Image: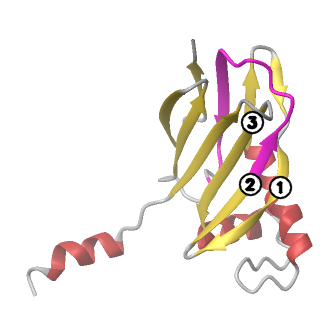
Amino acid sequence: MTLLLPWMFLLLHPFYVSVVSINQNTVEKSLEVSVRIFTEDLEQTLRMQNPTETVDLIKLTNGPKMDSLISRYIRLKLQLQTGNRSLHLQYVGFERIEESVWCYFEVVNVPTIKQLRIKNSMLYEFKKEQFNMHHVAIGGQRKSYKLSNPENQFELNFQ
């Protein structure tokens, strides 16, 4: 029984995290962006933002409507900028894998990136304990950064 107590503590105190991966595709001159969020957390947040909508990311009885809600929410909460140029996230789609939703975006016609500014406040309205991890691969360099609520922006430099 004493061996179970530490594990039970972890189960009773979940963590709230999303993971954003940004990879430069030099051949296509684009950025490939994926966002991984726990399904239940995203559903609850979308319900808070859209109280008149039926949100169901598991049964997907209304896939196009879920696409619209997800795309709108993430593009509102996640913004990318290089220099003075805002980068437009084009929604590609989403899929549910185990307990998470993976949302995919692309930024086309991306110039050479020397500096990338990221604003991200996803799920901050859902849980004050939320944090968002970022993994960025630009020009062969990989960098990571963690934003903890209420911190919502950072900048990475690439040479």
- Location of residue 4 in the rendering, given as x and y in whole percent from the top left corner: 17, 81
Location of residue 50 (image quadrant): bottom right
In terms of depth relative to the viewer, which is nearer, 57 or 27?
27
Where the C terminus falls, by quadrant?
top right
In terms of depth relative to the viewer, which is nearer, 113 or 19?
113
Q: Is residue 20 above or below residue 27?
A: below
Q: On the picture, is 17 further left or further right than 59?
A: left
Q: Which residue is mark 2?
A: 104
Say which element carries label 2.
strand
In terms of depth relative to the viewer, which is nearer, 152 or 65?
65
Residue type at tag 1 = Val
- Location of residue 113 in the rendering, given as x and y in whole percent from the top left corner: 70, 19
| In magenta stretch: residue 26 | no
Q: On the picture, is 94 further left or further right than 121?
A: right
Real-space Cα distance between discs 3 and 1? 16 Å
Q: How crowded is the residue under tag 3: few (<14 C-alpha within 10 Å), some, or many (20+)? A: some
Q: Which residue is mark 3?
A: 79
Say which element carries label 1.
strand
Q: How crowded is the residue under tag 2: few (<14 C-alpha within 10 Å), some, or many (20+)? A: many
Location of residue 153 (image quadrant): top right
Residue at screen point 82% across, 71% down: 51
Residue type at tag 2 = Tyr
Rendered image: mark on residue 92: 1
Front label number (3 vs 1): 1
Q: Residue furthest left?
A: 2
Badge 3 or badge 1: first in the primary sequence: 3
Rendered image: mark on residue 107: none
